[in-house]
Amino acid sequence: MSEEPVKFTLSERDIPTHWVNLLPDLPGEPLPPLSPQTMEPAGPPDLTPIFPMALIEQEVSTEPDIEIPEEVRDAYKLWRPTPLFRARRLERELDTPAHIYYKYEGVSPAGSHKPNTAVPQAYENARAGIKRLATETGAGQWGSSLAFACSLFGLECEVFMVGSSYDQKPYRRSMMQTWGATVHRSPSTLTGSGRAQQAHPTGSLGIAISEAVEIAAGREDTNYALGSVLNHVLLHQTVIGQEAAAQMAMAGEQPDVIVACVGGGSNFGGLTFPFVREVLKGRASTRFIAAEPSACPTLTRGTYRYDYGDTAGLTPLMPMYTLGHDFVPPPVHAGGLRYHGDAPMVCGLVRAGLVEARAYRQNETFEAAVRFARSEGIIPAPEPAHAIRAVIEEAESAREAGEARVILFGLCGHGHFDLSAYDAYLAGELEDPEFSEQEMDDALARLPQTPAIA
Ligand SMILES: Cc1ncc(COP(=O)(O)O)c(C=O)c1O
């Protein structure tokens, strides 16, 4: 056996004690969310019907570090710290001088990074006396994570699952039900927002969010939980990047470039923000790459302006790159990346030129995922397959430049429930659905008039 380490592991004592809040480090004043009723800046009172105060405080906090409650750290022990791997076999397969590392979040009970925020969200809602959480899910990863977290803190959980994923991933539904959740195919006929969207049977994250928000706003004992986009969600995910920084130090290396996929931006933010802080403070010069689907190219082709977080226009408006809140992306298998907008914090970093965004077609991401599975063993979820595609490009360009470039990427979930997509790819039947510029323009034309962003 060679002496070369492949895994860098931390002990439970090394689970971070604080989350990293990037908000105070970002250049300029943060742009406030706008109330959907008044189009004026939304404050905490606009959010109390659906979120507990502790999470609202985290959402707007300007403290650089926020303490993680002991009960949450205890629950994190079920799967954290997660391993960091050096992808030596992939490096050999690619014949690259690059050193490739990946932080693997697929070891969580739900199989992705999503429990990192599901647990603190369920914890704070239970502490506030809430009995039930309503949510949406795309690929099923978020819904299963929240179902798991609710089971830890004695909450009921109701999930609206995007229609196309509900059909493609029946066992994700079984998982949620095993943890005690109720699951509806979205658009459903249970809500006004769902009934209004029956013409889009494949559904979208935006529609499912509207359904869950509607349920939460209509019941005293029920709150809403979002799996991405919001500041507090990205905050919770920074346990990933903090552990990765400690593990890279164990490996004796610093990343030159960090890559992650972006659906709403939470695994990207979680992995990169502790490193972005170092760049903003002038202590590092790391590059950051956000990988997204060319079928839903928010960061690469969207317009930067205020838009709703959901299709029906029930949530506050946020400044972000958007394809239009009622744009329904084609049904690619990376269901978690089918969202019309992105986290305001991630969009701000793209706009400031600190993060580069790249878009990939479905088949090229599966080609990368299969190459990864055949060298490293792990079968990736279709979402991080986008990051792997970008990593392969970086590793190839390092070879051309003759550089021992250090690449770190987020392998944010496994693909054990996505095998129908692998089947289609292996049978040569996977499609590359086209993004429609016209549909985006039409959706953008339906956006409300909001203050221009300087
Ligand atoms: C495995 C996986 N990766 C990525 C995403 C995208 O979300 P985010 O950009 O918030 O990490 C999802 C969302 O459901 C997911 O399940």
Image (spheres, rainbow, N blue to C red):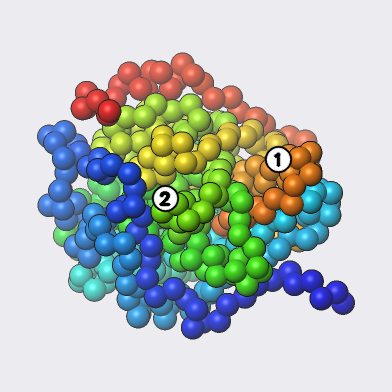
Residue appearing at x 31%, y 62% in the figure: 64
User: Picture coordinates of residue 328 (x, y %)?
Assistant: 44, 31
Q: In the picture provided, is 37 more to the left or to the right than 67?
A: left
Of residues 181 and 76, the one nearer the viewer is 76
* Mark 2 vs mark 1: in front: 2
Q: Residues within 10 Å of mark 2 (few under 14, many from 20)?
A: some
Q: Amino acid at mark 2?
A: Leu
Write the residue at 50% across / 61% down. 241
Q: Earlier in the sequence, mark 2 or mark 1?
A: 2
Point out which mark residue 432 bears.
Answer: none
Disc 1 residue type?
A: Glu
Q: x, y (%) of residue 129?
A: 20, 71
What residue sits 74% from the left and 52% below the top?
Answer: 404
> Are the residues tagged 2 and 1 within 8 Å (C-beta)?
no
Q: Is residue 309 left or right of residue 143?
A: left
Q: Residue at x 42, y 41 (%)?
A: 349
**Residue 225 horizontal/vertical position (percent):** 32, 56
Mark yes or no: residue 386 visible.
yes
Q: Secondary structure at mark 1?
A: helix
User: Is there any visible trace of residue 342 in the rendered image?
Assistant: no
Q: Which residue is mark 2?
A: 280
Name the residue carrying label 1.
393
Horizontal and vertical percent position of residue 454: 27, 28
Report the quarter where the N terminus lies.
bottom right
Identify whether 32 is placed above or below 221. Answer: above
Q: Which of 25 and 140 lies nearest the eye of the viewer? A: 25
